[in-house]
Image (cartoon, helix red, strand yellow):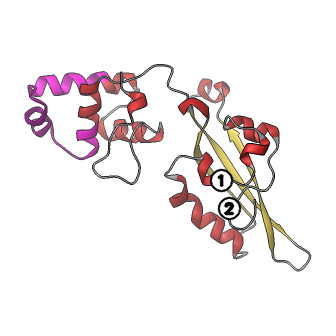
Amino acid sequence: MDPDIQIVAAEPDFSRQFGRTSADTCGRSLYELLHPSAPSVLNRHFTRLSEGRSARFAERMVGLGNAGRVFSGELTGIAVQNTTGRLAGIVVQVRPDTEADAAEGKDVIGPPRERLLSKLDAQVLEGIAAGASTVQLAARLYLSRQGVEYHVGLMLRKLKAPNRAALVARAHSMGMLTVGQWPPRVLPEFIK
């Protein structure tokens, strides 16, 4: 990449992870290949590289593949200096999580093999993400408190989350919730 985070050259394996060819990847911003939340986390790392305050970094990331496929992994940035010691570019490596990581107990974000949530589940998740209580959700969705708790329990099991906060965090990490919008909304590709 150049110092402006534009991809100037890409190996085929790198591009393939994002469902693109090398030619299609070049000329794009790295951020076009990543979840919309990436700039907020990565900007300070790239700034530190540009200013010479660090030579490399490694950060967790969520990449966007073709057909809405989402995957997690580790992104490493390495500063490349020219002969005068100024930043010439940045080498970026992406190591996606693998099935071996899942076997070791690490969470892996994979492509949604099926639409995970019903429309009502999505409304409950949106309410939880916005901080609504069970009573508020029950009134808003015309459900009983037990009905809300039933749908919350279903989602906790589906997403393997121990509590509501973890449920929202897991949904966000999977790219299910919109970024930069309040109140959060579940993206349509996750709704049956």
SS at mark 1?
Answer: helix
x 50%, y 25%: residue: 112
Q: Which quadrant of the structure image shows residue 104?
A: top right
Residue on which the image places disc 1: 30
x 23%, y 40%: residue: 127
Q: Main secondary structure of the magenta part?
A: helix
x 66%, y 29%: residue: 98
Residue type, mark 2 in image: Ile
Q: Label 2 vs label 1: CA separation? A: 6 Å
Quadrant of the frame with the N terminus:
bottom right
- Of mark 2 and mark 1, the one earlier in the sequence is 2
Residue 126 in the image: x percent, y percent?
A: 27, 39
Residue 2 in the image: x percent, y percent?
A: 75, 64
Q: Which quadrant of the structure image shows residue 133?
A: top left
In the image shown, does 178 or 76 lie closer to the viewer? 178
Question: Is 99 on the left-hand or right-hand side of 166?
Answer: right
SS at mark 2?
Answer: loop
For the record, the magenta segment spans 126-154
Residue on which the image places disc 2: 5
Discs 2, 1 touching: Cβ within 8 Å: yes
Quadrant of the frame with the C terminus:
top left
Question: Is 68 on the left-hand or right-hand side of 10?
Answer: left
